[in-house]
Image (spheres, rainbow, N blue to C red):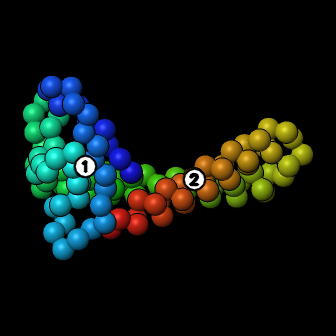
Amino acid sequence: MCLHLTDEDNTIRYLALDQLTDNPFHLWKDRSKESSTLTLASGTLSDEQFYTFFLFMIYTSQLINICAVIANSLCIAVFVKLGFSEPSNISLTALAVCDFTMAVLFTWATCAPC
């Protein structure tokens, strides 16, 4: 996972997500030069603030993914009970199965860094 940023002087910096080390606040490694802050348009974001935001995004996406898994499980159960005699039931069941699969994969993928 890479993040591409541009500084005020339009130099492109490539940041790559490293494996978690003993210091949980050292998540991003600047490939062009060493930096302890992430420069954004509105200012700077320290490592601790970025880590807090990163965890907030992970926990929020986990909650949304769990709700998606539950909702799609119910949809699949309802459409199986209705039967597959109508083409719309087949299409909606396929959509629910696809969404369920993606929610499970995203739940697993966002849980991996923690």
> Residue at coordinates 24% horizontally, 39% vertically from top-left?
13
Q: Residue extending furthest top?
A: 9
Left or right, 86 with respect to 81, comes to right
Q: In which quadrant is the C terminus drawn?
A: bottom left
Please, what is the three-letter code of the amino acid marked with disc 1?
Answer: Arg
Q: In this view, does 11 lie above or below 111?
A: above
- Report whether 36 appears left or right of 92: left
Visible residue check, residue 98:
yes
Amino acid type at circle 2 is: Met
Is residue 56 in view?
A: no
Q: How crowded is mark 2: few (under 14 residues within 10 Å), some or many (20 or more)?
A: some
Q: Which residue lies furthest to the front in this view?
A: 32
Q: Classify mark 2: helix, strand or loop.
A: helix
Given residues 39 and 34, the one toward you in this image is 34
Per the image, label 1 sits on a secondary structure element best described as loop
At x 54%, y 59%, the residue is 105
> Residue 9: x percent and y percent?
15, 25
* Residue 4 place in picture, x, y as percent: 31, 38
Q: As drawn, is 84 to the left or to the right of 1?
A: right
Categorize mark 1 by other alpha carbons within 10 Å: few (<14), some (14-19), many (20+). Answer: few
Which quadrant holds residue 88?
Answer: top right
Q: Residue at x 40, y 65 (%)?
A: 111
Q: Mark 1 = which residue?
A: 31
Question: Could you tell me how many numbered marks the image carries?
Answer: 2
